[in-house]
Amino acid sequence: ETLQAAARNLELEENALDNIPRITADVEDEDSIVAMVKRTKVVLNTVGPYRFFGRPVVKACVEQGTHHVDVSGEPQYLEQMQNEFFKEAQEKGIFVIGACGFDSIPAEMTLVYLREHFKGELAQVETFVTMNSGPKGMKINFGTWQSAIHGMAHASELVELRKQSREIIFTKSLPPSDARLARRNALFWSDVAQGWCLPFMGSDRSVMLHSEMFRYQLEASRPVQIQTYLKVPSFLHGIGLVLLAAIFGIMSSFSLGRTLLEKFPGLFSAGMVRRGGPTRDQALGCSFTLVAKGTGWEEKLAEPTDKHGSPPDKSLVVQLQGPDPAYVTTAICLVQTALVILAEK
């Protein structure tokens, strides 16, 4: 049925994809996972929540020398896999790359673009993402909702994971910052985004900061400070979202609350979450806009540990637009990531 639906989406005959070989693999059956990863050069893993289903696939890929990419936006999973498999993957010359969907390729692209075009010393980046709902509305997949519930519930795990990463991977102490980029934690008006904004609770900031730490470790490139925000339709929408987020945070902190969140996702998300995700028409009607402001200095210093003697004196704003973030953009980003790996390796 899935292949027939895919054929219809591609405007092909309904049975056009019926002869494509299918491989059955189960995360609870290690042999089936190993057999799967042996048959390919790169695995595109979209089976979440990754907290529950991701590690067996990553483990098999690393052991068999197969590249692995996924669309996880779960910081605990991403950082646990990094700590556990970084050295072995590096020794085998393979890529294990998470967050290859809307979380967090678009944000990473704006950061890379700013780095390449700033023409000076880039020091700070703030991103503002807008989710543009289509005429039939925007829905969130239940798997994404479930990942967010357990990510919030186990956020404290990040403290120990990041301590481990500093001992295993990021062993060079980061240089002191010339100017601190403060996080704005309340609802605020942004002239850059031209609207009311809240802190963005997705994985973009975590992922981009890790990229910056890798650049410093491997390339001695001065790390950039990063903050990420979500633009909301209005002040009242922002207040409503704050209230929903507060309820979500409280409910995620205890077992019964998590059960209720999973049992009644529509109620606790104001109708945004549905099992099975959006319809095709809903997805095709949605889009996103990402605005990124880079701030820094006209003068570029020789060493990443050198200090500027004055406040930042230069800025650059870039904008990225794309189709439905959850399905269309995520699918494009994931496939393109795999193609780049195949082309370069």
Image (cartoon, helix red, strand yellow):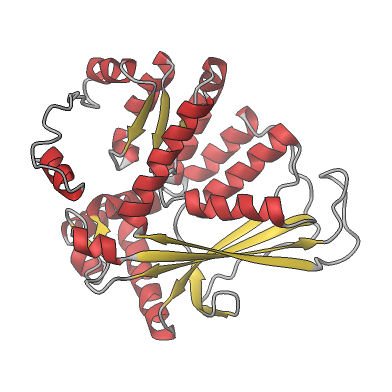
Foreground: 74 or 115? 115
Quarter of the image where one finds residue 131: bottom left
User: Residue 342: x and y, percent?
Assistant: 46, 27
- Decide: is 185 above or below 142: below
**Residue 219 visible in the shown view:** yes
Q: How many marks?
A: 0
At 81% across and 58% down in the image, what residue appears? Answer: 178
The N terminus lies in quadrant: top left
| Residue at 18%, 44% in the rendered image | 6
Residue in view at x 43 percent, y 75 percent: 232
Residue 120 falls left or right of residue 329: right
Q: State the image coordinates of residue 72 (x, y, percent, origin top left).
A: 39, 43
Q: Is residue 97 above or below residue 34?
A: below
* Residue 161 rendering spot, x and y as whole percentages: 52, 38
Q: Residue at x 49, y 53 (%)?
A: 106
252 or 86, nearer to the observer:
86
Regarding residue 224, the answer to whether it shows in the image is no
